[in-house]
Amino acid sequence: MSTPHQQPPAAPGAPVSAPAPTWEQPSAAGSYTSPIPITRTHLGHAITSEWTKIKSVRSTVWTLGTFLLLVVGIGLLVASQTADRDYVDVPYTLPSFFGLVLGQICLITLGVLVISSEYGTGMIRTTLTASPARHRVLTAKLLIFFAVAFAVSAFAIGFVGLATAGMHSGASQEAWIGTVFKGALYVSLLGVLAVAVGSMLRHSAGAITAMLGVVLVPAIMPAFLMISESTRKVGEKMLDYNAPNSLAKIFQLDSGSGGGTSQLILLIAVVAAAIAGAYVLLERRDV
């Protein structure tokens, strides 16, 4: 029987060589498992993140505080200066219209800042690193902003309506709950449009300026367009669908206008087109 070959003992003082290392393949049973729980992210996480952001920054407090001050303050001031006979054919929420004409600028400003401020500070890189699904981030911003804007707007309009009804009880037979919903929806959609424009332009001043143009230019241009017969029809349409006149129709200042439903439908179509453009550009461009 053969015996394994053995090396002769080394001479005294000779260096001793280390044994050759042996490599072992890790077994499947001994594979590493992270102790940190891993959860698949979803839209709910992005919504939680955006809610934390919007309630934490000072711009939200200032813009929404100014909005409430304008709508409620001007509304109550107008209601206190009116008589019962002024509400025979109009809803009790009418005084809030005068505050909304100015207050909508606050929601537009906040809508732009919701996303453009992150581009200005560079925080958008952190946001998109934490949530690489860009469409999910934009969706969360749109949903959170719309919910906040609609809730605050509906509260302001409804509060003015209740206060006015208390001052002039029994003077109006017009239902006014619908104006709370439509009025809040209209100004909230303007804010959502501002979010989409802010996402596309990525610059706070530029996006706010663009949105002011969207609101103010159609209200000013009809005065010039209706001078000429060739542009009169364009001026009339612009006069019917600009933001101040759309709100006036919603609050029934213009009788027989359908309550501003057609104006709301047009705004929804414009907002949908802007949101689609924002999604496309967000996916195609670098941060």
Image: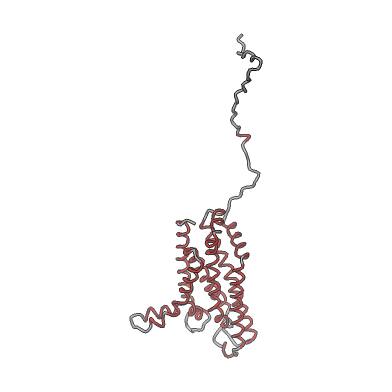
Q: Is residue 248 above or below residue 138?
A: below
Q: Which residue: 33% across, 80% down? A: 230
Which residue is depicted at the point 61% across and 79% down?
72
- The picture quadrant where one finds residue 161 is bottom right
Q: Position of residue 286 (x, y in %)?
A: 47, 56
When the figure is inspected, residue 67 is found, relative to residue 43, above or below; the finding is: below
Q: Spot the residue most to the left.
A: 230
Q: As rendered, which of 107 and 202 lies closer to the eye?
A: 202
> Would residue 268 be found to the left or right of residue 154 on screen?
left
Colouring scheme, one of rainbow, by chain, secondary structure, one colour: secondary structure
| Residue at the image position 55 percent from the left and 67 percent from the top | 146
- Location of residue 227 with respect to 25 vertically, above or below: below
Residue at the front extreme of this rendering: 13
**Residue depicted at x 61% and y 76%:** 68
Residue 1 coordinates in the image, percent (x, y): 61, 8
Image height check: is 12 above or below 83? above
- Across the whole image, how many numbered discs are drawn on residues? 0
Q: Is 143 or 123 nearer to us in this picture?
A: 123
State the image coordinates of residue 124 (x, y, percent, origin top left). Answer: 54, 58
Indicate the quadrant where residue 52 lies: bottom right
Q: Is 227 on the left or on the right of 86, as rendered?
A: left
101 or 155: which is nearer to us? 101
The x, y position of residue 190, in whole percent, is 51, 71
Looking at the image, which is closer to me, 23 or 7? 7
